[in-house]
Each structure stands twice: as structure tokens, then as C-alpha cells.
Amino acid sequence: TVLEFMQGADVEPGTLTSSSRYQERMTIALLGEDPITELWPILSTLRDENNILLPQSLAALQEMLLSDERCPDLVLLHNTEQHANLIDICRSTSHLTREKQVPLAVIGTPISDTDEVSLYDMGVADYLLQQRNTSIIQARINILLQLKRAHDMLARAASIDTLTQVYNRREFERCFETEWRRGQRSRQSISVILIDIDHFKAYNDNLGHLNGDNCLRQIASSIRDSARRAQDLVCRFGGEEFIILLPETDRTGAEILAEHIRQQIIDLDIRHSPNFKDQPVTISLGVASTLPSQKGQSPKELIDQADIALYKAKKQGRNQVAV
Ligand code: GH3
Ligand code: MG
Ligand code: MG
Ligand code: MG
């Protein structure tokens, strides 16, 4: 369980809350024995500008770090008397904070230089002495939060395709790996839909590249509107190809979505070049589905299958979904 500690709220131990209500505020997860009593001055200042979550155990903290929605922006470990324990707790936390790119800091009473260096070696960003002036502690925590903000902004910019504003191929590959591993654990299906615009070379040749770019944007935005679940990932895979990653989705579900997207693109009614008479711009879609937990399955093979299905859709006349 996680306790939410915020401005104006009654603190009720054991209350489960959601932090997603406060999007602009940063979220600090603080793990300690009795942090509310021990760290009252610093907590009461920090909560003006941040959400403070108090995981009730190391396991609860780790669960928060693993979740996408509840992952904090900073982890603070409160070091109580058992210093031997601290190194262990940091070790088991730091591999997760590093993976999720969340800064980790410790606040507590003085420790030996050797111990402090060990903590930094593990990736701890700062050791804050709790008896120091509250405004110094707060300033140092603010620096960590600012760095985290800058990191998130850069990471976001690096994951988006600038032309279409959907995710780029690098982000697809990163998420595909993560979702594949999640699928291996959960034994659920994973699906992909590979999408290619029909006769797009002719569109460009007849109407020009700028119109071509606009067409790409419209199609990307329509696909994104169709794949609405939070875990669905719409990406630009290459020139005029898109791919949708669908975790926890079986073949039937993916086919239904693919067919819906195909229809939505027709409904956009984007005028093609004159050679295409009254036919609007259309897309072809290849669907592939698998169980990552099953032996012999690989991410690469799933993409190959989608590619083969897409080729089939093209060969059978375009403007259709193939499996
Ligand atoms: P098919 O139905 O078989 O897919 O035919 P096609 O003409 O769409 O396929 P082809 O692969 O021959 O052409 C793809 C075209 O997509 C070629 C290229 O000019 C265009 N294209 C790729 N990336 C972009 C882009 O970023 N902007 C614009 N405007 N056009 C692009
Ligand atoms: Mg193509
Ligand atoms: Mg082609
Ligand atoms: Mg094409």
C-alpha cells in the first residue's frame, strides 16, 4: 500500500490513492520508518509543490517504480538507525530507479565516507543530511527534480516523429522489447498491425511532396485516434509505413481494430491524384499475433509475419486487411 501525503489532505495510513490527478506536479516517493514524524519540516515544505507518496514497504516502492502510471519522479530513502540495511535497500532499489531513469537520493543522519561513496557508486544522486537547514535540503531536491524534468523532455522529444507526431521507430523498438518481456511473464498475446499507404508514390509525384507530407499527417492522426487504449503504441515505421503495437491483444482484436482503421482512412476522403478517379487515398494493413511466452517465438518473427501479411494485402488488391 502507498500513502499519499498532500497539501490539505488528512493523512490516513494505508489509504490507496492515485497520483495521476496532479499532472504538473512532480511526484516524490519517500520510503522510511516513520518519515512523517522524523522529517516533518522538510515534508511540509516539499508538499507545497510536489505530491509525496509514502510507500509502506520496499515491495510497495518497487511496485510503484515498475508501474507506468504511478512511477515517481524522485525516490527518497530515509535512512534510520540501521545503516547496514541502507546499502542493501539502495542496491535493490537502484537497479530499478536506473532502469526507469528516476533519480534516487537518501536523507538521513551522518554515515561514514566509505558508506557514502558506496551509495554514489550504486547510482544514488545525493546524500542529504536531515539535520541541515530545510531550505538547503529542499534546494538540492529541487535540482534533482529539475534534472528529471529536463531528462523527461529530451526523452519525449527523442521518441516522437517530428513530421507526424506519432512515436518513432526507436521508441517502437524500445517498447516492443519491454512489452515482449511483459507478455512472456503474463502469458498474454501481443499483436502488431503494419500499415502502408497505397500508391503513395503516385500521390507524391502528382500532388507534390508538401501535400504528401500533409497526407501522412492526416493518416497518422486518424490511426492514433483509432488506437485509443493507453497501452497501444502508434509509430511511424518508415517513410509511408506505420506500425501499431498492441499488448494484451489477440489476433481477433487486432483484426477488428485494423478493419476499423482501414474504414476511418476511407472516411477521411483524401483526394488522390486525378489518375485515381473518385477513389480516395487508402491503406493496406498486415496483422500478426503471437504468444511471447510460447517457445520459438521472437519479436523479429512477429514483424516478419506482419510484413508478409501486408504484402498479401497489397497483392490481393490493396485497401484491405490481411493476416
Ligand atoms: P504501394 O501501394 O505498393 O505501397 O505503392 P507506393 O507507391 O505507396 O510504394 P512505394 O514504396 O513505391 O512508394 C512509397 C513512397 O512514399 C515513395 C516516397 O516518395 C513516399 N514517401 C516516403 N516518405 C515520405 C515522406 O516523408 N514524405 C512524403 N511526402 N513522401 C514520402
Ligand atoms: Mg512502403
Ligand atoms: Mg511499397
Ligand atoms: Mg505504399
Image: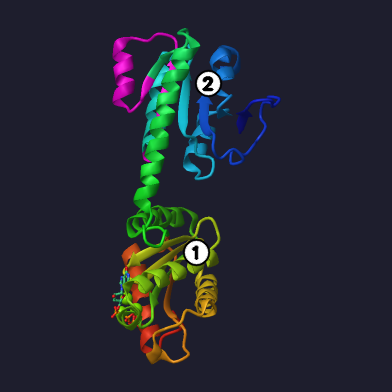
Name the residue: 50% across, 71% down: 254
- Dot 1 amino acid type: Arg
Closer to us: 315 or 185: 315
Percent from the top left, x then y, of residue 279? 46, 88
Q: Image point 47% across, 8% down: which residue? A: 133
Residue 78 in sight: yes
Q: Is residue 143 above or below residue 219?
A: above
* x and y, in percent, of residue 259 in the image: 52, 78
**Relative to 266, is 20 above or below?**
above
> Which of the pair 322/182 is nearer the observer?
322
> Callout 2: 10 Å neighbours few (<14), some, many (20+)?
many
Comparing 80 with 206, the one in front is 206
| Colour pattern | rainbow
Q: Position of residue 302 (x, y in %)?
A: 37, 68
Is the C terminus in the top left, top right, bottom left or bottom right quadrant?
A: bottom left
Q: What residue sits right under mark 2 in the picture? A: 32
In the rendered structure, which segment of residues is drawn in magenta? 99-126
The residue beneath circle 1 is: 224
